[in-house]
Image (cartoon, grey):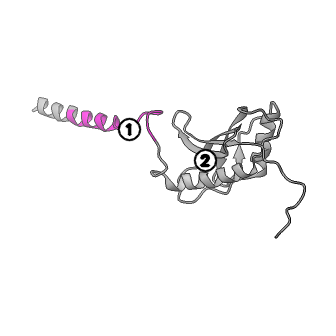
Amino acid sequence: MKNFIALIFIFVLGMQMAFAETLPPKGYYDVKPEDYPILFEYMNNYAKQLFEEFNPNKFWLYGFGTVEFYQIDNDGFIHDLSKPENFYDRELIRIVKRLPPKPLPKQLEINKIKIWLVLIRNKQDKFKIDYNPINECIEITIYKDHQRKSWFKKKKK
């Protein structure tokens, strides 16, 4: 009888260990926008704001860019911005401070979002949003070329 109870006890412990192993380890899972529509819609709106504001200077070299890692909390406040070290960093931090994000939607049950923002001057004008499973953050990459602003207004026809 003791052997039977011990066998059942070992079987129950083994089942609990088997269920614990089914969780994906950090860095090995694929997150798609279809799986998290609220999060990616919020980040898409924020990335559009950043994309419209970003206008690389004509002295900004092609292919050059900058990277910043920061956090947005529930209220839309930005935390952990680093000190600018060069021209590119100053431009990125100026854009981030000028455009404060909206508060997180109530449907998201998270306290903060980590963001890895990459700004690059390139001939393409586009942005993309990915989830970086290694750093557990949202990666926003913006490619844009210098947009000339005309001093003269166009005449209406």
Residue 68: image quadrant is: top right
The residue depicted at 67 percent of the width and 57 percent of the height is 102
Q: How many marks?
A: 2
Q: Mark 2 belongs to which amino acid? A: Lys
Q: Residue furthest bottom?
A: 157
Q: Residue at x 12, y 29 (%)?
A: 3
Q: Is residue 27 magenta?
A: yes
Q: What residue is disc 2 on? A: 112
- Measured as percent of width and height from the top left, residue 146 is found at 78, 43
62 in the magenta segment: no
Side of 3 relative to 74 (left or right): left
Specify the segment rendered in magenta: 11-30
Question: What residue is drawn where x is 83% and y is 35%?
Answer: 59
Quadrant of the snapshot with the N terminus: top left
> Which label's residue is closer to the chain start, 2 or 1?
1
Question: Closer to the camera, 153 or 67?
Answer: 153
Residue depicted at 31% across the width and 38% down the height: 19
Q: Which residue lies under the disc numbered 1?
A: 23
x and y percent of residue 21 in the render? Answer: 34, 34
Q: Which amino acid does the dot numbered 1 rest on?
A: Leu
The CA distance from mark 2 to mark 1 is: 22 Å
Placement of the C terminus among the 4 image quadrants:
bottom right
